Every structure is written in structure tokens, then in C-alpha cells.
Image (cartoon, coloured by chain):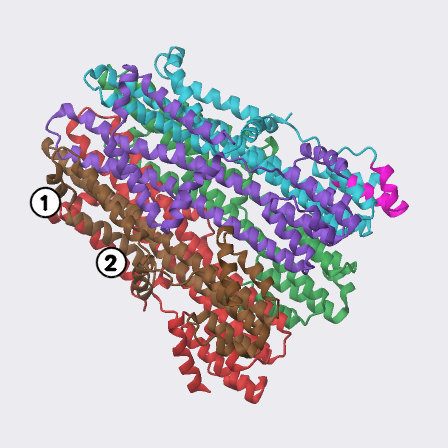
Chain colours: A green, B cyan, C purple, D brown, E red
Amino acid sequence: MDIASLAGLVLGVVMVLLGIVTGEGGFSLIPNFIDVTSVIITIGGSLAGVTGANKIPDVINGVKGILLTIKEPGYNPGEMIGNIINLANVARKEGLLALEEASSNIEDPFLKKGIMLVIDGTDPELVRGILETDLIYTEDRHKKVIGLWEKWAELGPAWGMIGTLVGLVNMLKNLSDASTIGPNMAVALLTTLYGSLIANWLCNPTAAKLGVNNAQELLIKQIIVEGLLSIQAGENPHVIEEKLKCFLPPSARDAVGADAGGGE
Amino acid sequence: MDIASLAGLVLGVVMVLLGIVTGEGGFSLIPNFIDVTSVIITIGGSLAGVTGANKIPDVINGVKGILLTIKEPGYNPGEMIGNIINLANVARKEGLLALEEASSNIEDPFLKKGIMLVIDGTDPELVRGILETDLIYTEDRHKKVIGLWEKWAELGPAWGMIGTLVGLVNMLKNLSDASTIGPNMAVALLTTLYGSLIANWLCNPTAAKLGVNNAQELLIKQIIVEGLLSIQAGENPHVIEEKLKCFLPPSARDAVGADAGGGE
Amino acid sequence: MDIASLAGLVLGVVMVLLGIVTGEGGFSLIPNFIDVTSVIITIGGSLAGVTGANKIPDVINGVKGILLTIKEPGYNPGEMIGNIINLANVARKEGLLALEEASSNIEDPFLKKGIMLVIDGTDPELVRGILETDLIYTEDRHKKVIGLWEKWAELGPAWGMIGTLVGLVNMLKNLSDASTIGPNMAVALLTTLYGSLIANWLCNPTAAKLGVNNAQELLIKQIIVEGLLSIQAGENPHVIEEKLKCFLPPSARDAVGADAGGGE
Amino acid sequence: MDIASLAGLVLGVVMVLLGIVTGEGGFSLIPNFIDVTSVIITIGGSLAGVTGANKIPDVINGVKGILLTIKEPGYNPGEMIGNIINLANVARKEGLLALEEASSNIEDPFLKKGIMLVIDGTDPELVRGILETDLIYTEDRHKKVIGLWEKWAELGPAWGMIGTLVGLVNMLKNLSDASTIGPNMAVALLTTLYGSLIANWLCNPTAAKLGVNNAQELLIKQIIVEGLLSIQAGENPHVIEEKLKCFLPPSARDAVGADAGGGE
Amino acid sequence: MDIASLAGLVLGVVMVLLGIVTGEGGFSLIPNFIDVTSVIITIGGSLAGVTGANKIPDVINGVKGILLTIKEPGYNPGEMIGNIINLANVARKEGLLALEEASSNIEDPFLKKGIMLVIDGTDPELVRGILETDLIYTEDRHKKVIGLWEKWAELGPAWGMIGTLVGLVNMLKNLSDASTIGPNMAVALLTTLYGSLIANWLCNPTAAKLGVNNAQELLIKQIIVEGLLSIQAGENPHVIEEKLKCFLPPSARDAVGADAGGGE
């Protein structure tokens, strides 16, 4: 599990609570910040906009996407490069057909599909075309989910302001009892607070994290595409290693070298 | 019918009403939020800007575009891939000319036009050129409609603020009767509220939804272009299937395989 | 004449007046909204910025560009496609040199130049290079004019705020007479109102409309480039028609077919 | 000298003064708007950010860049095209080597370098590569200077707001003497006013003008690159003229033709 | 050491202190601006968002990135060009294999790797591919660090506003004692002040400076790629010098010539 996103959410709640309870009155002030109607208006209104901006299955799929922010992808670029170098060595020594057996315990469906195409003797341009189409539309689908969280981050504060305007108009129409101005104003401000939290505590970091995961997955897939095409072209495994290590930060390159050396 | 956009609009209205009637006074407060002049200024002013930014027919066409947000496109990528694989099988077994009969019950005009070009023996580069020109300018026209809603989303709050400034100046010039300050201020704020609703309840989600529909249509058209050119190049239907399935999310790929298998 | 932009400006004025005169006091309130100094500061300050951001001739040229928003371009894509198909038929039947006579009554200088290049036997790559350079730098010059209006739209509200800040400081330094606070505040707000009108009533729609006209002109020019190169390549007029009609919305395509058929 | 930027700055000052002195009190109000500490905080703070965002020599170089906004470049595209056509005629009649003498009185270092490369018989691809590298990195350096002014335009209002917040906190902590609230508030607002002026009077127009000059220089350099490569390829001077005139607005093309005709 | 970023930070602190102590009360006012809870909420909340938007190691790595803003890269483009010209002369006179000895004292790992590839006789396209992959993903990693500081610059003011809203609600709920309104309001504003400082004093300049360093490193690497490929292609050292000097501003070109001349 990748705890960063979860830790971010928990820490954010702690910060808001800290801000509340350090006022004179301590924990007794917390109820001042809870107003069910305001919650419903801000979340409901902004989600209404998000729904109107999408198709229903994409909304459900997008909202569930938050679970991906805490999921470890289960592989890393260095490991993948090691795998590909091993495959390159197999192909070099035993021929492309030997990849079938060598890939039997590979789980990554993208790599598996690519190997099958190579074994089938598909034209390299077509292999690249097929794998890159997959890559492009994978990113497209990720961007749809990310876009939903960005849209919510945009609409949350907007509906927070709508809620506050509604509250202000109600308050201003009825200024006769001066003692109620403060509390009414406080309630009116709550939707702005909720809207800001939706954006800056929840949606903005979630969208950004999904983008980080997308970049990571694309990196892996680009390594696979370059690696497979090099294997198909019969390039020297050492050159392939050199090439693929360029995808990694310098500090991570030596580790790959060691692994690959062991695999040779 | 695609109910998401309609649901979003209805839900948004419910949220605003909820915000109003939960003030002390309940449903009797609703009239406080209705001011015909303010409605006219905010909608009229922002639409004046939208009109000035376009040609009259494009304004009419663009505003009517909202109806497309609730229309189901009537086809889906998976189905289209199934159709193309069937056509590929026909072409493979009976030759390109047999596509004429096989396409007689196809309704999609873009696919139909592409098949005609292929049957006529048009040069593949020219087929791609013609279909991609169609695709690019289709997107161009969609973007014009989307741009109109985005422009309205931009000008709505701006004219809401103009209305509020006009109201404030009127109010400030005449501060003698303190009891009218609150209600006058409330009325002045209504245009800001309306402007915000125009943007965040109506225009922003509508523009985004039209963008989603545009992306969906372009995806279908790109599948058609790739598929037809593969058929023209005489590629193996299984490879075509493999290629086109890359346009789909992994979860939808198996379903296509099954369909296509049945069609073979 | 294209009345959309003019109508937008007039409608905008009506909306502001409506907002003013519906206050208690009716038309007598209008003078409250007119303050010559504020007008000078807001327009003068923002135009000072626009001037500083350009060269003098470009400022004059750019400001005059607003007249283009109400000018009909005098041709449309469908008509142009008809013309080109007619030229294609002439070239097909009587050879490229016959284009000289056929083009004698053509007024569009871009099409005329292109035909001359084709008649002179210029290399197709060079024809494309010359015409596309023209096209790119035409857009460049349009973008300069559009950019001026966008810059003004950006600086208008900024100088409106500067004016309001100046007014506020003057007011706050002298709070002794409470009865003047309201009216002074009202005057201070006027520059914000003017700035917002400069942006949202005048400049933003003007810039957008100039962008629409630019897109329209580029579309025509792209049709000309594609059409002329197809004629030079000796393509079949029917294929040329099919190709050029892809630039049009489906609803406009049949009309072109009919015209072209009559012209054959 | 290009007076537009200077005129813009002067006009801006006049507008602000106009706004100040039309308050009741006239010129005696000017001291209200001068607060040395506020000036130091706003300019100092924003320049601190600009410094931190760059290297020291780039800051000095960038700030001095403002002088370029009032400098005439000393050549114009039409003139340059005339020069190149003359060179083309020389090369056509007397051979490429004759360019050495013909270029002896050329001052533009970019054109001079290009001619030397052509005379040396450098491979055309390499000539283009060298000149375009020069062009790209010239733009890169210009963008660094422009970026500095844009960064200042961004940080000016931000530090204006920081100054105002500091002033507000000081004021709010000490509300006992009501008569000081107004003047203290006025002083607090001054940094916001200064920040807004830094951005909208000084930096934003300066950055934009430097962008205009950059575009002008790039246009000239692109004309030179296209022209020299055409000369090297031995193209007909009339075709070169036709090609290069596409970089100019139609209204400026005839003038070039006349000049070039005279030069032949 | 590159002192610009450090100087910027110190200068910013001085400016804020100056703004504080020039209020009536001088240095005794400083405690008014220090509120530990507000510091924790603003920094903690915004860092919570930054953490949630990334993976833990990337957060640590990113935050440490600030140290790079004060580190001199230890080489400059002019020097690197001199080195490459020397290598070109060696390769010209003694052959590509002589580069091995000549490069023995080179420390730059990117240049070293490139030379090894050239010596090994790797195909030029592959050399370019490997080096450019390295370059692209180096920039990718830099952008990750820059993105973290930009995200913090974005979330800082947002959490400042959240803190202020929390403070305002607490204050408004309890307006009975009028004398506490000012001080409470002052405390509420502190988080907005802190948030603005996080963005405009710390994060925005840091992100920009890291971008400047990134551009510098990419420039060096692009010079290396172009230089090595020219050496491999056996180009004339004088032409290589001419080519690489185009990466430099005109003022720095002569210095390189002198160095290179000395190295020949």
C-alpha cells in the first residue's frame, strides 16, 4: 500500500481540527463547524456539476479511482528493465521463439501481449503501432478519471461560494436582529470552507496523485515498448541495458546493472 | 437518452432550493431570491457578450447544442470494432468489392463514406487524408459549440459582478435610510449569485459534457480510420482485432473478442 | 454586414442601463454612473499599458481592427469549394494553362496567386511552401490584432482596480464626515465597474469575434491550398470534391454537390 | 527610438496622478499616496522573489532589458527582403562566390554568418541546422528576459497583498483609537496599489513589448534563413521574391516589389 | 555557491520585518505576527496536500531539492564547448579511438557515456536515441521536483484561506465582546499571510530557480549530444565550433573561440 495519499488526508483533517480547537472554547467549538445542510449543498451541488459533465458510468468509475491513490502498482521500472534484459539474453541465445517459455511466468499483460506479437513475427512497425495505441488510450482513460477529480476541485469552491451567497442574501434581507448577524454570517461562510476543503484537501491532491501513478505506468510501458522492439531487432543485450537504463535516475542505474548481471 | 446532464441540472436546482429554504422562514424565503431585472441583466449581458463573440447562426446552433448533452450517440466503440472485424472477414474471404453488399445496412455515414472510398480503389494515403480532414473539421465544429458554452461560463460571473457593482453604487449613493441597506445589498448580490449559477450549474458542466461526447465520437472515427486502412492493406482480421482492441479499456476487450468470434 | 457584434454591444448597454434605472429613482440615477475622471483613468490607464506593450502603428491598426467584427468576409467555404471544383474541371478538360482564362474573374488574391504559381509550373512542394507561409503569417498578423484586444481586456479591470484603490485611499484618509463615505465609495467603485465593462462588454467579445473571423479565413485558405495542389496533381474532380467537402459540416455538403454538379 | 513604451509609462503616471488630484484637496493629496516603507516592501519583496528565481547576472541582464523596449531594431522585414533579393540576383548572375563582395557592407551579423556558410560551400542541411540553432537559442535568451518581467508582474501584486496583510494585522491588533482606523487602513492599502502598478503599469507592458520585439527579430531571422537557403539552392530570384513576400502583410508587399525591381 | 536564491530568501524576510516594525510600536509588534498554531495549520495543511499528491520518497527528494537552488552546477556551456572542440581535434588527428585517452580526465558522466558509445562504434541513430532518452527523462525527474514546489505554492495560500475561514467562523459565532473582534480577526488573517509567504517568498521562486537550473543542464546536454554526433560524423572541428557556438549568446562566443584556438 502507498500510504502517502492516506497520510495526506488524515494530516489535513488534523490540521483543520487543530485550527478549530485552539480557539477559546476548545473542543466545544467543533459543532460550530458542522452544518449538515451546508455539507449537502456544497458536496451535492459540486457533484451535480461533475455528474452533468460526464456519463453516469464514468462518474462512478472516476470516483472509485480514489482507491488507486493508495494502491502500490506492484512493479517498478528497475525491476522491469531487469526482466527485459533477461528476455533479451534468452532471445539472443535461444532465438525469439524461446521467449514463449521464458515469458510464461510474466504477469504484466502489456509485456505479455508485446512478447506474443514479437513471437508471432508481427512487423516491427505494427508492433510499435499496436503497443503505442494501447499506451495512448490507456493514458486517455486515466486522464478521464483525473479530469473528474479536477472538475470537482474546480466546482467545489464555486458551489461553496453559491452556498455563501444564498446565506448572505437570507441574512441581509433580515438584519433587524443584530445579534444574529454574526452567527448567520458564520453559517454562510461554512459552505465556502467546505468548498475550499473539497478542492484543497481532497480533490486537488487526489488528481495530482493519479497523475503521478499515470506517469509511472506510462514510463513502464515505454520501457517495455523500447525494450521489446530492441529485442525484436536483435540488438546486443548490453546495448539494450544501456538504452533502458536511461529511463532511470542515475542513482538507480547501478542496481539494475547488478540484477541484470546476475540474470545473464 | 443520457440522463447524466439532466440529472446534474435537476440536482443543482434542488441544492440551491435546499440552501434557501433551510433558512429561518422556509419556503417563504424563495421570493427573496427571484428578481426579474437581475435575471435579465445577468443572462442578457452575458448572452450579449456571447453574441458579440460569434456569428448569429453559430450562436443559435451553439445554444441548441445543449440538447446533445442528453442524447445517446447510438453506437459504442466495442460494437464498432465488432462491425469492422466482420467487414475485415468479408474482405478477406470475398475481396474488397464484397464490402459493398456487406455495408448496405451500415448507417454510420463516416464508415459508409470510408468503405466507398476503399471500394473505389482510392489511394490509401488519400483515403487517410480525406477521412482525417473530416475528423479534424468535425472536431473543429464541435469545439466551436463547446467554446460558446465556455465563453458564456466566463461571461456569466463577469456580468453578475457588473450587476452587483451597479447595485452597490446605487445603494452607496443613498445611505440615508439605514434600514434599506441590507435588503438593497441582498438584491445587489443576486446578480453575482445568478452569474455563478450560470457558470457552475449550467455552462461549465454543459461544455464539459459536450467535450466528452466529442472525444467519444472522435474515438469511434479513429477506430474506423485505422480499421478501414488495415482492411484496405489486406491485414489479417486477427491482427486488426488485436490492433483495434487497443482503443478499448482492458475490461471491454474480451467482450469484443467474443462478438467478433461469433461473426466470423 | 455581420450584425452580431454590433447587436452584442448595443444589448450590453441596454442591460447596464436596465440595471441602473430599475433602482428607486429611475432615469435620474444615470448621472450617478457617469464620472468623466474615472472614465479617463480607466480607459487612459489601460490604453497606456496597451500602448506600452506594442508599437504605435500596431496599436492604431489593432484598435481599428474592431471594424472587422462587423464586416462580412464576402465569401463562404461552400462557394469557394464550388469555384475550385469548377477550376478542377477546366484543368481536367483543357489543361492547366486554361486556368489562366478561367481565373480571370476570380477576386480572391490568395487563390489568384496560387493559380498563377500552378500555371507557371512551380514545383508542388514550393507552391505549398509559399501558400502555407502566407497562411501562417496571415494568422500571425491576425493574432497580433487579437492580442491587443486581449491585452486591453486584461488591463481594463486592473486599471479599474487601481482607480478604486486610489479612491479608497483618498476616502479612508478623510473619514471625519461620515455622510460622504457612501458617495465617495460609490465613485471609487465606478472605475472597477468601467474596467469590468471594458473587458466583458467590449474587449473580450471583440477579441473572440476576431478569432472567429481568423478561423474562417484560415479555413478558406486551407481549402484553397488543398484544392490547388489536388488540381496540380491532376486528381479526379470528383475525388477533389469529396476531399474538400470534408472541410464542411455534413449539412452543408449536399448544397456544394448540387452547385458543383451544375458547374460541370 | 520607439516611443510607444515610454509614452505608455508616462501616460500611466499621468492617469494615476489625475485620479489622485481630482479628489477634494487636489495636489495636496499626493503625499497621501507616498509611503517610502511601503515602496520598499513592495518593490523589495517582489524583487527578492525575482532574484531568488534566477541567477544574479540574469537578474541584472533582465532588468536592463527594459531599455530594449524603446530601441528601434534598425531594420525592417521589407528592407531585409530587398537585400536578400539583391543578393539572389548577384548570386544568379555572378555565382555564389560573388556574394562575398556583395555582402561586404552588410551589418546584420546573422545574415553575414549565413552568407559565409553559403560561400564556404557548407551542406544546406547544416546551414539550416546552424542558423536555426542560433535562432532557437536567441529566442530562448529573449524568453529568459521576458520571463523575468513576467515573474515580477506576478510577484508585485502578491507582495502588495503581503504588505497590506501586515498593515491590517497591525491595525486590527490596536483598534482602540477609532480615529486612526481609516488612515491606517489607507496606508495598508498602499502596498496593494503599488503592487498593482508594478504589474499593470510597468512589468506587464514591458514583458509584452519585449515579446513583440522578439517576434520581430525572429521574423527577420526566418526570412534570412529561407532566403539564404533559396539562394544556395539556386532558385529563381522572382520565385524567391514571391516566397519571401509571403512573410509580409499584403499592404507591404508592393513596396518590396518596387525596391527589388530597382535593385535588379 | 549560487547566492541568488539565498539572497532572495533573506531579502524577503527583511522586507516583511520592515513592514512590521515600521508600525507604531516598532519591534514590540513582532510577536503579533507569530502564532504557532497558525504556522502549523498553514504549513501542515499545505504539506499534507503535497504529500497526498506524491509518493513519500518523492516528497522527501523534492523538498531536499531546494538545496540545488544554491548549488553552482560546476560547469558552463562555454567551457563545455571548448572541451568538445578539443575532443573534435583529437578525433580528427588521431582517430575516434584516441578519444578514450583524451576523455580520461572528463568528469561529466553524460559526456563520458556518450564518448564511450562513440568509441564502441555504436550506430549514430542509436547514440542519439540513448542520449536523448537520458536527456528527456532527466528533465522528467527535474519536473517532478519542480512540480512539488509548484504544488506547494498552490496549496499554501489555499490552506492559508482555510485557516482564516476557520478563525472567522470562530470569531463570528462569538461577537458579544466587541473588544476581541479586532485581535481575533488579526489572528485569523495570519494564516492568509503565512500562506501568501509560503507561495511568494519560498515556493514560487524556488520552483522557478529549479527550472532555470534544469534549462541550464539541458542546454549543456544538448551541446554534448550535437557535439558528439558531429565528432562521430567526422565533421570539421571549425564547423563544429561554429555550430556549437550558436547555443551561446553572441557576447560569449568570442571567448569560446579564443579558448578553442588555444586548445588546438
Q: Which residue is nearer to you in this view: C119 or A219? A: C119
Are discs 1 and 2 both within one chain?
yes
Q: Residue at x 38, y 27 (%)?
A: B160
Q: Is residue D252 magenta?
A: no
- Number of numbered callouts drawn: 2
In the displayed structure, does residue E52 sit left or right of residue A104? left
Q: Name the residue type under label 1.
A: Gly
Q: Which residue is mark 2?
A: E10
Above or below for C16 versus A137: above
Q: Tell me the quadrant of the picture where the C terminus of chain D can be found.
A: bottom right
Q: Which residue is nearer to you in this view: A21 or A235? A: A235
Observer able to see residue A174: yes
* SS at circle 1: loop
Residue E25, which numbered label? 1
Q: Name the residue type under label 2.
A: Val
Task: Give how far across and how far down residue D14 sits, in percent.
Answer: 22, 44
* Residue farthest along the front direction in this orientation: D262
Picture quarter containing residue E178?
top left
The chain letter under disc 1 is E
Task: Give how far across and how far down residue A133 sits, in percent.
Answer: 67, 50
The chain letter under disc 2 is E
* SS at circle 2: helix
In the displayed structure, does residue B85 sit left or right of residue E189? right
Above or below for E98 versus A180: below
Start-end of magenta stretch? B81-103
Label 2 environment density (alpha carbons within 10 Å; few <14, some 14–19, many ≥20):
some
